[in-house]
Image (cartoon, rainbow, N blue to C red):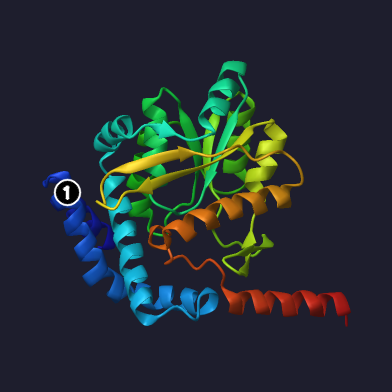
Amino acid sequence: MSDLGLRALLWLAGRLPLKQRLALVSFIVRRVLAPALRWPARIEANLDYVRPDMPPSERTALIDASLDNLARVFIENYDVPALHRRGAACPLTGPGLDAVEQARAEGRPVLFVTGHYGNPEAARAAMQMRGWSVGGLYRPMANPYFNAHYKENFHAVSGDVFEQGRRGTLGLLKHMRGGGMAVLLFDVYDSAGVPIPFLGQPAPTLTSAADIALRSNALMVPFFGIRHSDGITMTNVLETPIQHGDPTQMMEEATRRLEARIAEDPGQWMWVHRRWKPKRQARLQRKRAAAKMGP
């Protein structure tokens, strides 16, 4: 039933021109879906943890902006032809562009890394329109009916996609070693991750992206699909590549790049993610301390 409701929304929104489509879905998400799912409360909890002194008016505006961007990303990514047209109109820029072109000329793989900021798929669509086939890992949705068309849509944007997990990671690594290009979003909580400071608080962060870049000798390039104030047009930026070295230090640098973008426009980051989970972290630390002490 949940999937049928989402499909109905996709069908209705798809009948509208782009501007009206984005506005409608944004309204539904911000005023109906998000309150029902208690997303504002989740964002509030994140802000209490990392920005407790933020004035209430700024907090309210940030919550609304973040939910607006989330809604627009969702519906944008379900119109792949339009995403490709917009990718052609908003091409790739930034200091990393020449380095990527050189890597392609040399047959060297490229791993693009980013966070849940702006619309990463808009930048991936711009890469596709430049003639690059860019695969990636995706996290499967809990609803299997929704996940079926979610995966298909993700694949339609550009390149092969692999389901997150050991098998998918091996598939992506094989793809990279063949000189391929791929995208990874690294700002997702994982209890097995290394605690890297993010917005002032430790956030468990997997070093998978750095590990894959090192094992495949891939150029590791941070990128961002940045939404303009009109809510429609985008700027797709490739930043200076991250130098190879210690995997944790590489991920610390990737995190700093994301933090800089959030400082510029915090409403474009998807604050609804449970990025820190401080209570769970505290429980894990107590368990690890107890295990070290022994019986």
Q: Position of residue 282 (x, y in %)?
A: 66, 79
Q: Secondary structure at mark 1?
A: helix
> In the image, what residue occupies the spot 39% across and 51% down?
118
Q: Quadrant of residue 59?
A: bottom left
Return the residue nearer the eye: 6 or 36. 36
Q: Is residue 133 left or right of residue 122?
A: right
Q: Give the amino acid type for the residue marked by disc 1 in the picture.
A: Lys
Quarter of the picture containing the N terminus is: bottom left
Residue 65 drawn above or below residue 144: below
Q: Is residue 127 rendered to the left or right of residue 50?
A: left
Q: Residue furthest top?
A: 105
208 over 37 or under it: above or below: above
Decide if residue 110 is on the left or right side of residue 283. left
Q: Which residue is mark 1?
A: 19
* Foreground of the two, 98 or 87: 98
Q: Which residue does the image show at 63% across and 32% down from the upper left?
A: 219
